[in-house]
Image: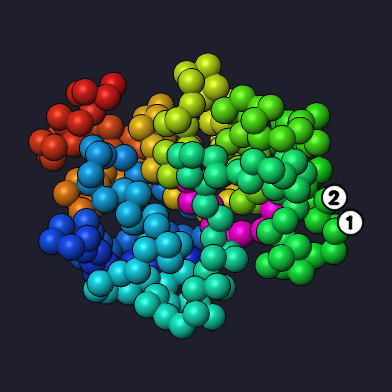
């Protein structure tokens, strides 16, 4: 039996002044599913992620995440943000805090974990992403790839049900991309529900259950990887793939 949808978008519309960034997007993501979102810049990919995490309000339609509906109350928004981790292009680490403190802080504040338990969780997660030895350093002492792995550990520290990744490798030097994608592969293999906006098409082909092609604020194509890369019916997708592959 297929898992139930943990994320459901129905007719989602998002406007920025006169520009319509999302044009009635419909999407259902099952628990444990890995969905990669690709497409040209300005197609609405990052905006869709930000609406799912309630970082952007929506102007039409609805989004349901883990049983909570948006638009919703402040309580609904807080619940969604606790259950949905997000990793951005930029690492957004607190520069004045050690790696340990960066990872341990949110569970202490939002989950009410004690310091000992939060620190133990931080140690475990930093080992999981392969940088346990950096735990007492500060962000500016780390490489970009190491900082992004700290950001992933920080999101995981909240024990979310869903992880959103918004171009997590786009700000990295090429030699650092591989180490971050390896962490994401392990996470995908563990059964985590993931939505990943990415230009790393080889990664999408390898780990995704489905790949979405977004253009002009809408999902133009949604298919498993084998069908997605063989698609010749959508001229915009064919053009995009010819430039990217």
Residue found 22% across the figure and 56% down from its top: 21
Seen from the viewer's position, the closer of residues 170 and 129 is: 170
| Residue at 15%, 29% in the rendered image | 239
Visible residue check, residue 201: yes
Report, in whole angstroms, how far the alpha carbon at label 2 lies from the one at label 1.
Answer: 6 Å
- Quadrant hosting residue 60: bottom left
Residue 201 location (% of width, % of height): 37, 30
Expressed as whole percent of the image width and height from the top left, the position of residue 153 reads 66, 44
- Looking at the image, do the residues carrying marks 2 and 1 touch, with CB atoms under 8 Å apart? yes
Residue ID for mark 1: 116
Front residue of this view, candidates 199 and 103: 103
Q: Residues within 10 Å of mark 2 (few under 14, many from 20)?
A: few
User: Is 18 above or below relative to 214?
Assistant: below
Looking at the image, the residue that sits furthest to the top is: 175
Q: Quadrant of the C terminus?
A: top left
Label 2: which residue?
Answer: 120
Residue placed at 81% from the left, 43% from the top?
Answer: 123
Task: Give the residues in magenta.
Answer: 157-165
Above or below 179: residue 158: below
């Amino acid at each position: 039996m297929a898992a139930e949808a943990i994320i459901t978008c129905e007719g989602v519309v998002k406007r920025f002044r006169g520009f319509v960034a999302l044009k009635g997007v419909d999407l259902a993501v099952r628990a444990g599913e890995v969905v990669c979102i690709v497409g040209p810049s300005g197609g609405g990919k990052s905006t869709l992620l930000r609406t799912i995490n309630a970082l952007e309000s929506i102007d039409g339609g609805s989004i349901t995440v883990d049983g909570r509906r948006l638009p919703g109350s402040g309580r609904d928004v807080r619940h969604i943000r606790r259950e949905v981790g997000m990793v951005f292009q930029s690492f957004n680490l607190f520069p004045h805090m050690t790696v340990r403190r960066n990872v341990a802080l949110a569970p202490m504040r939002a989950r009410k974990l004690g310091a000992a338990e939060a620190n133990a969780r931080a140690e475990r997660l930093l080992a999981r992403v392969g940088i346990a030895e950096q735990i007492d350093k500060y962000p500016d002492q780390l490489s970009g790839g190491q900082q992004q792995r700290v950001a992933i550990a920080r999101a995981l520290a909240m024990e979310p049900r869903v992880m959103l990744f918004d171009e997590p490798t786009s700000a990295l030097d090429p030699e650092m991309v591989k180490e971050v994608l390896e962490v994401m592969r392990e996470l995908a293999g563990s059964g985590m529900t993931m939505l990943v906006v990415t230009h790393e098409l080889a990664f999408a082909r390898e780990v995704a259950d489905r790949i979405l092609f977004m253009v002009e604020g809408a999902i133009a194509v949604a298919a498993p990887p084998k069908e997605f890369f063989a698609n010749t019916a959508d001229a915009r997708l064919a053009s995009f793939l010819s430039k990217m592959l």
